[in-house]
Image (tube, rainbow, N blue to C red):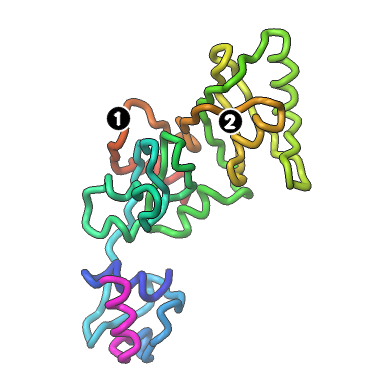
Amino acid sequence: MRLDKFICKSTELTRNEAKKLLKKGFVLVNGEVAKDASMQVHENNSITLDGEALTARQSRYLMLHKVAETICSNVDEVYPSVLHFIDLDKAFDLHIAGRLDADTTGLVLITDDGRWSHNVISPKKECPKVYRVWLRDDILPERIDELTAHFKAGIQLQGEAQLTRPAILVQVDTDEVLLTITEGKYHQVKRMFAAVGNRVEKLHREKVGTIELADLAPGEWRYLTEDEVAQFL
């Protein structure tokens, strides 16, 4: 991880405070003065601050039920960050592994472990994500088989050279479906349905890998279990 992040995980310092101490030469990595905040370090390195050995606290892994009109960012913008719901020290040192749009609700995974979040979102890992989708137009019974096959074969999105990866479409109601995808292109679910002449009216993520939102109430969060964490290590 970055050296400034390691310092923050080992102390009560903010990122800006850590950078100031680095510039002053107070930090040694394996006995050498280190001033580059972006320097990559590992937990087995010897890292000291003003002569005191640093040990990073354990990484944190959480899940949150995102509500609408919030954003998956560490900075408030038009809408507030979902991290306001996390009542932990240094909650804003965490980041979201796989973002949702402001108007999309449901499961988000939150951590301070960059390698773990990379495994969640990397297209190479082909992690399945299940969305419940409410549509503007009903799917007629005579079209569902054709549409299911189309999503399985891949959808041509506007501005994309390649088809989407195979997706699984399951009809729940005339205007409601479950869609499972294994990639995370920009506004992908909305664009997939736009490509077939429909419009997503409401979108809710229920599952990432084997981690399910289940009965976690809107705005609530919990720590992931060891088994839930292990699937992305």
Q: Which residue is situated farthest in the front direction here?
A: 78
Label the magenta part by its dominant secondary structure.
helix
Structural crowding at the residue carrying mark 2, measured as other residues with C-alpha within 10 Å and reported as few (<14), some (14–19) or many (≥20) = many
Tell me, yes or no, whether the highlighted magenta stretch contains residue 40: no
Residue type, mark 2 in image: Thr
Q: Where is residue 146 in the image (x, y as percent from the top left)?
A: 75, 18
Camera sees residue 95: no
The residue that appears at 36% across and 55% down in the rendered structure is 76
The boundaries of the magenta stretch are 14-27
Q: Nearer the viewer, residue 229 or 143?
A: 143
Q: Position of residue 97 (x, y in %)?
A: 46, 50
Quadrant that contains the N terminus: bottom left
The kind of secondary structure element at disc 2 is strand
Q: Residue 180 carries which label?
A: 2
Q: Position of residue 224 (x, y in %)?
A: 34, 42
Q: Nearer the viewer, residue 108 or 188?
A: 188
The kind of secondary structure element at disc 1 is loop
Q: Position of residue 94 (x, y in %)?
A: 35, 56
Instruction: Tell me where residue 167 sits by quadrant.
Output: top right
The residue that appears at 45% across and 30% down in the rendered structure is 206
Give the residue at mark 1.
217
